[in-house]
Image (cartoon, helix red, strand yellow):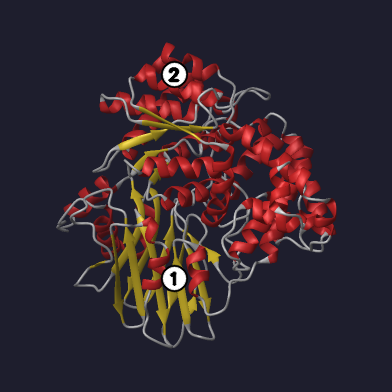
Amino acid sequence: MCAIAGCISFADAPDCRELLAAMRHRGPDEARQFVKGTVAIGAARLAIVDPDHGAQPMEDAETGIAVVFNGEITNAAELREELSRRGHRFRGRCDTEVVLAAFVAWGEAAGERFTGMFAIAVRFPDRLLLLRDRHGIKPLAFHCDARSHRFLFASDAKAIAAVLPQPPRLDLTTLADFAVLGTPVDGATFFEDVTELRPGHMMAVTRQGGIRVGPQRAFAGSARAATVTTAAKVSEAQADERFESALIAAVRRHCIADTEIVVSLSGGLDSAVLALVVAELTGRPPRTFTVAEDSHHPDAVAAARLARSLGAEHDFLAVSFESFLAAIPATLRAVEQPDLAAGPLFALLCHRIGLTARCCLNGEGADELMGGYAAYRTPESSLAAIEAALRRVRRAGLAPRDGVFTRIEALRAAESSGGLRDALLAHDRADPLERGHLQPVDRLSMTASVEMRVPYLDDDLWQLLKTLPPSMVVGPPGASGKAILRRFATRRYGERARAIVTRPKLMMPEAARGHLTRFRGLCERAIPDRALRSSEFGGLFDAKSDFVLFEMFRRQVFAKCEPSGIRDVMAEIAKRPEAALAAL
């Protein structure tokens, strides 16, 4: 686990050390670069597996192929065995050595063999190849300036923006996309001229006679590219048996590490099941971590109850309203977009985990896989909210990308045919999962030098669930969702899981429900309507709190204002002393 970066330059000596320095929080153990010809690639490493033999970049002396790699390859053991049969001799047990050997053996086709979470850069003698995992768990951004003959890539888009000669500029089309759908789409970022490599894709950059960026190509087996056929005439019992086997195997793969594996408990079903399975597989309860406004919050109570039943050492973090407000600026900088995403509480939780652990299991992805959100029970309201947001964006004079309209048209067509719930589920498994959940979780955890693993997005489990009838996975329309996971927990863990299975879903942001409500109320009282009307961006937002978050993000990232708190920004927007806000 680490940050990766690189540079191709014809104008001057290639060097990616400045990029790595901007991301050193992601890899505090060691930072190095490899330079050959016009190419530099580098990594800042957080050692999780085989600390002694996993130094990056890693080069094969015979072929000149070199790699840097961020993530975990969950089928590394199987690939190591296959490559060993082909005659490769490994020095250690780290994933990076397997990744390098795979590209030496199979070239670009190696990418389709990997499972897990990864962002990889491979320096071949004639090209640079970038790859990203099928779900977008690990981020990878790039920038190309044909005029200066320079190409950059990095794990964080803001790291690239920070080293460019011109100040970073806000991409207004991305802002429009975000205002309509709640996330950027199609690899766009909020930084002009900085793009994300799309999940499940690879891209070659050649440098003969100048830099040429090839098209992004979905590699075989990509979850974004594969067409999955629903299994015919599968019974519920058969579905449950396959799911149980796949989930247990997924958690087992995600527990491979040379460091302690801990679990973040949200108080809900998804993380509770992970803790139960880890305890079963390892024969001992994992350490668990929970965050909420106070110990009486329903999420905190449910998490503590489960931890006691497991006999787990449980660490609970209570966050005050002022601590919540104080964490907002850093949260927005980390997630690289103007909303709270995984939220200040999650950011603070990650820092608490990072004091004593490096690797944590997290329940992200289960809701998108198995229909856990309340929106799936009333999908019409979700489409209506998107339509209303589109009208606001048009009134503000901005235009979203074509991809936004493509997504809206697909939802409209599904509503007409009676399939809106399944269409919304498919929509949420794409950009909203990647940009609204996985990237914020990755960036907030890596800010604290914590690797957050997401077993529900295991490739085999994902592919299985896509082949099963939605009624067996999600449950009937109007139900609570995740029916297959509830059956698994009840069947395998009985009384220990009963309370968590029947408990209404609240989700991670609900741990800050009171703080969020208070923050929104504060914004409504403090920010006059005229402040939104006088701003070129005010009309984009349905709530004043969203406008305040955008202004906080815009000022600290693009206007390069001196660091300030969220109350300071509110006071500037409202044109009133901060002391007056304190009385609200």
For label 2, the crowd category at 10 Å Cα-Cα, with few meaning under 14, some 14 to 19 and many 20 or more, is some
- Under circle 2, the secondary element is helix
User: Which of the two residues, 411 or 521, is positioned nearer the viewer here?
Assistant: 521
Q: Which residue is mark 2?
A: 305
Residue 571, x across and y down, in percent: 71, 54
| Residue that appears at 26% across and 46% down | 78
- Please name the amino acid that badge 1 sits on: Ala
The relative height of residue 558 versus residue 264 in the rendered view (above or below) is below
Question: Does residue 514 sit above or below 179 in this rendering?
Answer: above
Quadrant of res 247: top left
Residue 347: give x, y in percent of width and height.
49, 45
Spatial separation of the CA atoms under disc 1 and disc 2:
51 Å
Q: Secondary structure at mark 1?
A: strand
Q: Quadrant of residue 459?
A: top left
- At label 2, which amino acid type do we have? Arg
Q: Position of residue 388 (x, y in %)?
A: 81, 47
Of the image marks 1 and 2, the number of the one nearer the N terminus: 1
Q: Is residue 129 left or right of residue 143?
A: left
What residue sits right under mark 1 in the picture? Answer: 204
In front here: 499 or 455? Answer: 499
Residue furthest to the top: 495
Of tags 1 and 2, which is closer to the observer? 2
